[in-house]
Image (cartoon, rainbow, N blue to C red):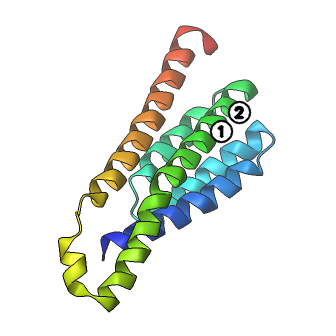
Amino acid sequence: MSTQRISQEQRKNTQICLDILLQCKTGQQTIAALDEIAQIFSAAGDPVAESAKQAFQLSQSMDEASVLQVRDEFINQFRSFLAATESLATTSTDRIASEKVSPTVESAKPKGKRGCLISAFGILILVIALIAIAAVVFLLVGGG
């Protein structure tokens, strides 16, 4: 599977999950959405699935405001990922077009775009993991 195809699949799944979360107005809707998001990413073999599963499990014992805060964090992270990878997706499309025109031009181009995708996803996973840790601390210290 090519890097461009993985990127497009990740972007598509992220956009679907963002749309799902944007429809959530209550904590209960958000909890159900987190379960659905975990399933979507899990089916794609995406590492974000684990963070979504943890958020789903933790959110079941949180109050409404905390669940909505988790929802907002996921929304922000999904938007950030889509913004960070938009230029990569555009560059990949341009690269495919240039390969058809001139493979020599392609071989002269820098090949550092894959690192941007990995870094963006690494940051997304790290932030979601930090949210999950904060939720656990909240529950242990005074929330529950």
The residue to which callout 2 is attached is: 68
Category of crowding for the residue at label 1, using alpha-carbon neighbours closer than 10 angstroms: few (below 14), some (14–19), many (at least 20): many
Check the image and report above or below for 22 versus 65.
below
Category of crowding for the residue at label 2, using alpha-carbon neighbours closer than 10 angstroms: few (below 14), some (14–19), many (at least 20): many
Q: Are marks 1 and 2 in contact (CB under 8 Å)?
A: yes
- Which quarter of the image is occupied by the N terminus? bottom left
Provide residue 46's location: percent of width, then percent of height.
Answer: 40, 59
Q: Secondary structure at mark 2?
A: helix
Check the image and report above or below for 49 versus 27.
below
Quarter of the image for residue 2 reads: bottom left
Q: Secondary structure at mark 1?
A: helix
Residue at the image position 80 percent from the left and 39 percent from the top:
26
Quarter of the image for residue 71 reads: top right
Check the image and report above or below for 43 versus 137.
below
- Horizontal side of 37 relative to 3 (left or right) equals right
Provide residue 3's location: percent of width, then percent of height.
Answer: 32, 69
- Horizontal side of 109 relative to 129 (left or right) equals left
Provide residue 126's location: percent of width, then percent of height.
Answer: 39, 36
Residue at the image position 44 percent from the left and 50 percent from the top:
48
Q: Amino acid at mark 2?
A: Leu
Q: Indicate which disc residue 71 carries.
A: 1
Q: Amino acid at mark 1?
A: Arg
- Horizontal side of 98 relative to 65 (left or right) equals left
Residue at the image position 47 percent from the left and 68 percent from the top:
90
Farthest residue in the bottom direction?
Answer: 100
Is there any visible trace of residue 57 in the rendered image? yes
Farthest residue in the right direction?
Answer: 25
